[in-house]
Image: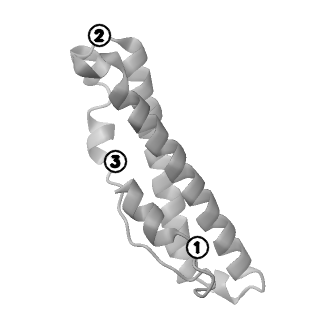
Amino acid sequence: MLQQLGNELNPDPTDQGMRIVFYNLDTVVLDSTSTTKYEVIDDMEFNRKLDSIRYELVHLHRKIDLHTESAFSAFMALDNAVKNRHRLTHKILQHVAVVKEQIEALLKSPSFDM
C-alpha cells in the first residue's frame, strides 16, 4: 500500500499539486494489539521496532488526512496553497520512504523468523 500511495502522489508537473488520494491507513488493529504483543513476543527490541513503525504509520495517516482536508477547504483560496500542497506531498513521499525502509528492515531481522 505504501508503494501505491507513493506512486499516486508522485509529482506530475501538469497537475499543479492537485492530486488527491483517499487512503485510510487503518491503524486501529495496530493500536488495539500494541500491548498484547509484549505478552506474546519476548524480544523487546523487536517490539520497540514494531511500536516505532506503528507511530510512523499514525503520523503518516495524519499527513494524508491533512493533504485531503486541504484540498477541500478554504486553504485553497490562499495565494501559496499550491506551493504548500507540493511541500506537503513531498513530506508525505519522504515519510513513505522512511516507513518502507523500517518495515523492510524489520522483515529481514532474525527475530521475525521466530
The residue beneath circle 3 is: 27
Is residue 38 shown above or below 33?
Answer: above
Badges 1 and 2: C-beta atoms under 8 Å apart?
no
Q: Nearer the viewer, mark 1 or mark 3?
A: 1
Q: Which residue is found at the position 48% from the left and 65% from the top? A: 65
Query: x and y percent of residue 90 in the render?
Result: 63, 63
Badges 1 and 3: C-beta atoms under 8 Å apart?
no
The residue beneath circle 1 is: 11
Please identify the quadrant where the C terminus is shown: top left
Q: Which residue is found at the position 69% from the left and 89% from the top? A: 77
Badges 2 and 3: C-beta atoms under 8 Å apart?
no
Q: What's the residue type where badge 2 is placed? A: Asp
Q: Which class describes the residues within 10 Å of circle 1: few (<14), some (14-19), or many (20+)? A: some
Tell me the CA gap for discs 2 and 3.
23 Å
The answer to which image quadrant residue 108 occupies is top left
The residue beneath circle 2 is: 42
Query: x and y percent of residue 110 in the render?
Result: 33, 16
Is residue 28 shown above or below 106?
Answer: below
Query: x and y percent of residue 91 in the render?
Result: 62, 58
